[in-house]
Structures are given as structure tokens and as C-alpha cells.
Amino acid sequence: MAERLTDHRYRTIDPTKLILTISKMADRVEEHFPASGLSAVANEVAAVAEGTVARVKEIKKPRMGLRIMVGFMVVLVVSGPLLFSLLLSFSDSMTNLGDFLQATDAGLHMLLVLAGGIVFLIGMENRLRRNQALEGLAEFRSLAHLVDLHQINKDPGLDEVIAPEHDRRTVRSDKELAYYLDYSGDLLSIVGKLAAYYAQNLQDRVVLDAVNEIETLTSTLSNKLWLKILVLREMMTKAQTGSESWK
């Protein structure tokens, strides 16, 4: 069997290409639907993408000041009890079993408390990174719902009397409606990819769960769009077949 050559560039999301793809997408929406709400959302997604790459880069930076402070506190937590124990006077021997059990039980509890404190201090940097990532991911959730709000009244066969005036200016035909729904689906997919960029760079279980929630949300909203597109295509096909039958 021939040996397959692999390129590791295709195993990770390239931030430069990610921003370029989203920028081109926003330009296409602006060109097709100028001064529309969807175009404004697309430009906002492009701006958020640039901010996301910068934020992830900032989150990944080592916090040397925090690490020095945590290291000092860990040394203090470990050395404090040892220095304190040197100031105490101990009896040369245990008089009975109760004294021995009492001493070992107190020492065990002290070691557990110290170990818990050390673990808490060491994990402080990761918790700060997690909180920053969750703040950014919450923004993606809002963007996904915003995209959905812009297409929610774009239904195939929608009566012009019911459609708002600005919608009739934006979408004038079934073909334009198909483009509008397709672009909305692409924007939802992009939001999911931005969330995946966090998962690629931050190996944190809580962050990964939040990313999965956003990807599930964007997939669910995209499925609604594809149902509309399928219905619209069927209507367009029937309309085309009916017009040809009259020829």
C-alpha cells in the first residue's frame, strides 16, 4: 500500500485564512444585499472574527506575573506550617494510642488542606483563561440568534401584505430569497467555525462543552434554513414546470 503524505497545515484552522474567508463572505453579502440587515450582521461577524483571533492569541500568552505570584504563594503555603512546627515543642514519646491517632489524624487533615490550596493556586491561570474564553463564546451565541432573527420572517411564498416594507426592498424574488437564506446559513456555519477556533487553541473541558453547544445551536438553526431552501426550490421548480407547460 502506497505511503500517504500528510500536511499538518490541513489539521488546524489557519487564522489568516479564516479571517480572509469571512471577509470575502461579508463582501458578497454586501454586494448582493447592500445596506441590508444581513449585510450589517455579516460585517459584524467579520469584525468579531478579527477580534477572536487577537483574543485567543492574548489568552494563550503565559502570565508570568501571575505565575511568579502563585509560585511565591505555594512556597509560602508549604513552608509556613514547617516553620510554625519548628517553634512548637513536642513530647519525646507517645504515651498512648490515642495520642498517636490524634496526631496523625490532624497531620493528615493539614496535608489535605495544603494540597487543596496548592491545586487551587496552580489552576488559577487556567481558570482565568477559561473565563475569558467563555465571554467570547457567549458573543457567538448572540450572533447566531441575530442571524436567525434576520431570516425568521423570510418564508417561501410569504404574502407581500404581511412582509415588512424593508423586507420587500431587500428580497424581491424567490431567487433573491434563495440567496438570502443561503448566505444566512453560511454565516451560521462561520460562527461555528469561530467557536471551533477556541476549541483548537484551548484544551479545557468546560470550553470544549461550550463550543459543542454553539455548534449544536448553529447546526439546528441551519437545518431550519435548509428546510426553507428545499421548500423554495420545490416551489421554483413547480413554477418553472407550469410556465413551460403553457408554451
Image (cartoon, rainbow, N blue to C red):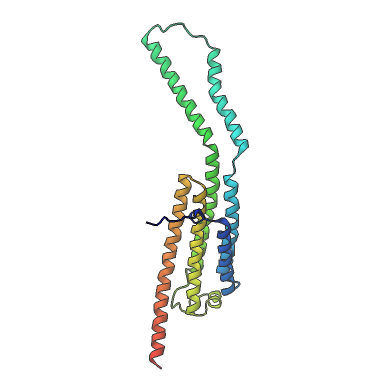
Direction from residue 85 to residue 245 in the image, left or right: left
Residue reaching furthest to the bottom: 247
Between 220 and 205, which is closer to the camera in this rendering?
205
Residue 33 figure quarter: bottom right
Percent across and percent down for residue 185 are: 48, 66
Direction from residue 174 to residue 69 in the image, left or right: right
Residue reaching furthest to the front: 2
Residue 37 in view in this figure: no
Percent across and percent down for residue 149 are: 50, 65
Q: Is 56 situated above or below 149?
A: above
Percent across and percent down for residue 165 are: 55, 76
Residue 189 in view in this figure: yes
Where's the C terminus, which quadrant?
bottom left
At 58% from the left edge and 30% from the top edge, which residue is drawn?
Answer: 71
Q: How many marks?
A: 0
Between 201 and 30, which is closer to the camera in this rendering?
201
At 57% from the left edge and 25% from the top edge, which residue is drawn?
Answer: 76
Where's the N terminus, which quadrant?
bottom left
Q: Is 98 situated above or below 150?
A: above
